[in-house]
Amino acid sequence: MRPHVVAQLAVSLDGVASGFDVDLARFYALATLWQEDVTLIDAGAILAQEHALLAAPRRGPRAEGPLLAVVDERARIRSWELLRELGYWSGVLALYADQTPERPPDATTPELITGYDQVDLAEALDVLGRRGVRTVRVDSSGVLLRTCLALDLVDELALLVHPVLIGGDRWYDTGRLDLRHAGTEVFRDGVIWTRYCVSR
């Protein structure tokens, strides 16, 4: 059975997902409400934070934390040990496709191979579900999230809407998405946290 998939992202009032300051402590505190079994992210998001990750303290794997699953079709991640040791996740899982380039052998990082030249996200979620995963949180506002939405894999959408207008490309461009309101909270600084179930 496929897990429940939650997509959480911070956006501006005009639907842009970058170009403004996000209170990351609040963002991730809210994320804990789902008690996800797996955090799904793409390699690009990891690489964009690489310098900050290298400087972060290494507290060791968090036994009760979620598993970090990284979509890495081009085998760009080389710092699996660092990700394991950051203290946020219980472990890491590399999601590769059949045509993912050769990578250095790493006996400590489990791999899940699905799809031909791209990771088959639906199949990957099915496999995770068969392994007992109940909740997956997509930690992305880019291609990974848009792909999950286009493939109808997202069950719940949570937006942390900031009171700014940015202009530019919106995070969502995959066509109509029908939503059912599930709750809203307004913070003193004008940030609105609003959640929706994705209608099917």
Image: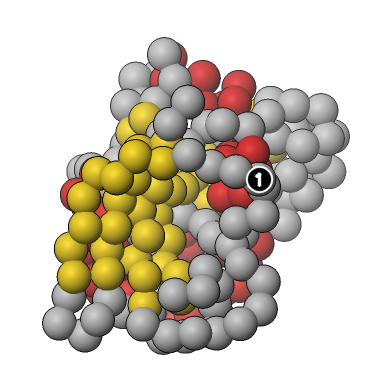
Q: Position of residue 40 (x, y in %)?
A: 48, 45
Residue under circle 1? Answer: 175
- Residue 58 visible (yes or no): no
Look at 53% across and 32% down and name the residue there: 153
**Residue 173 in the image, given as x and y percentages of width and height:** 66, 54
Residue type at mark 1? Gly
Left or right of residue 185, residue 60 in this image: right
Judging depth in this view, the residue of 145 and 64 nearest the camera is 145
Q: Which residue lies furthest to the left in this view?
A: 188
Query: In this view of the protein, which residue sits in the foreground, 97 or 199?
Result: 199
Badge 1 crowding class, 10 Å Cα cut-off, few under 14, some 14 to 19, many 20 or more, is: few
What's the image's color scheme?
A: secondary structure
89 to the left or right of 79? left
Residue at 35 percent of width and 53 percent of height: 158
82 up-or-down from 151: above or below: below
Give residue 126's position: percent from left, percent from top. Answer: 51, 19
**In this view of the protein, which residue sits in the foreground, 41 or 93?**
41
Please count the marks in the image: 1
Q: Is residue 128 above or below residue 109?
A: above
Quadrant containing the N terminus in the rendered view = top left
Residue 108: % across, % down: 52, 41
**Secondary structure beneath disc 1?**
loop
In this view of the protein, can residue 100 be seen by the observer?
yes
Kindly indicate the quadrant of the structure image that contains residue 63.
top left
Residue in view at x 72 percent, y 57 percent = 76
Residue closer to the observer: 64 or 148 = 148
Q: In this view, does 57 lie above or below 61?
A: below
